Amino acid sequence: MKISNQEDVKKSLTGIIEIISEKKAKIIDEIRLKDELIDKLVFEATFNQDKGVVELSRQLIKNIAVEKGIILSSVYEYYKKKARDKRKFTVPAINVRGMAYNTARAIFEAVKKDKVTAFILEIAKSEIGYTEQKPMEYTTSVLAAAIKEDYQGPLFLQGDHFQINAGKYKENPAAEEEGIKKLIREAIEAGFYQVDLDMSTLVDWSKEGYDAQQEPNYKETALLTAYVRDLEKELELDKLGIVINLGGEIGEIGKGIQGRNSIVEDLQAFMKGYLKELAVFSEKRGYQLKGITKIAVQSGTKHGGIRDEKGNVIKGVKVSFNTLAEIGKIAREEYGLAGAVQHGASTLDPRCFVLFAGYPPPEGFEISEELLTKKNAKILSDNPAAEVHLATAYQDTILDHSDFPKELAEKIKKWVLDKHPPKEGEDPEKAYIDNRKNVWGPFKFELWSLPSDVQDNLRKSLVKQFSEDVFKNLGVRDLNFIG
């Protein structure tokens, strides 16, 4: 049945879903809902050209999710407890870029199989752009996937790297600030109850002294923290007991002063200034504003992975676990944070993931003292990374899969190299690998429309990857995170 208008959507519900009210739906036929209707609703919510059809489909998916016990939630209280939690685990925050519905289905299948309750699904500001996937579309795809896979429980969505552009900020601070506020509001209204405030781009390494370097960062982070707390009241989330979980960042991932990793002094300067600024905002409002619960650091990794001249991932461990240990300990003990956050990790050797969670390296896996000393191994064991962000490896799994259609793969590669030609002296293969993330938006329809058997095989590979590489190694299998 072709869906042309809202009446067509309502007809497709016959015998499956009963609309009780604008915000309530009753499930009549669970099997037909999962076998046929949810696929149709999420497709129309994503691609239909009729705005009314899109809005009705999205609302129906949201209502069905609530009926099934899928609740958009915040990790705030859990992260406050994690600061004192002695268990060894790190929360995976998975960036779902393209083929959002199918990829999220793979995550929920692995989640159910491994009895995982500690996981976050996220999308970065930059990814929202190149995947052409606004927050509400993202939320709809994830909720639909949860319904399809019969998931129940809290669902944590996160805005990753909600970041200010330093160049634009320098030219017009008010306009750039207004832009990030608009994005934060849009995300929260879509059910993103986790937001990473990444003002690390504003750190001024040209200045002397840690406070002077971090000052623009902590001031803007505090201002946006206050903005979020105001939004909670405006949107009446406070009446629902929802506290938006916020994170800060003290070192821009993949960058920094002459490649320097973050150090404890950066954290202390940031937190001292941030808490002082937050106290001022609190006094103006007449109540204590809740602050960030985690801190992201620069530890030597890079988004997209560290690759050779051919674009192949260099699997050798490059992340400084010493940085995570030293900063994580102070973050937890002095500031009550859940700990340090690691970005750009999905392309690392997955065997090293156990180190994030505070476990010793597996047999046969060697790591140098430069990256993890014996002293810091003990510290990291007691203070695991709070969260690790994972993205590129799952993009690679899809686009490099043996079952991915060859003709479409060639079409995608040609498009990438036409739009992003190699720089002088650069291998075309590396240019392709570095820039193929940009295909998720322009090729969205074709990728969502792959034959069902191809999608099944892609999902099967992703399930194994999420289960074995991520959930097992990060210690979140059979973990009671929300109890």
Image (tube, helix red, strand yellow):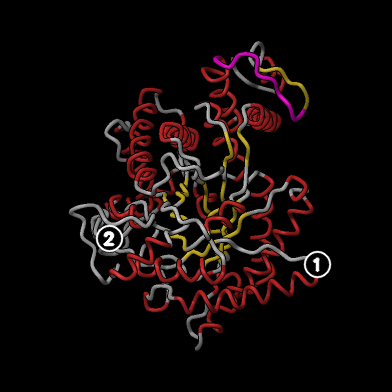
Label 1 SS: helix
Q: Is residue 283 above or below residue 135?
A: below
In magenta, the rendered stretch is 22-31
User: Is 263 in front, or is 114?
Assistant: 114
x and y percentages locating residue 228 in the rendered image: 69, 59
> Which quarter shows the N terminus?
top right
Task: Please report whichever mark, 2 or 1, sits nearer to the chain's N-terminal start.
Answer: 1
Q: Residue at x 43, y 39 (%)?
A: 478
Label 2 belongs to which residue?
317
Q: Residue at x 52, y 53 (%)?
A: 124
User: Is 306 in front, or is 23?
Assistant: 23
x and y percentages locating residue 129 in the rendered image: 54, 51
Give the residue type at disc 2. Val
Label 1 belongs to which residue?
285
Query: Does 289 appear in magenta?
Result: no
x and y percentages locating residue 209 in the rendered image: 51, 87
Q: Quadrant of residue 280?
A: bottom right
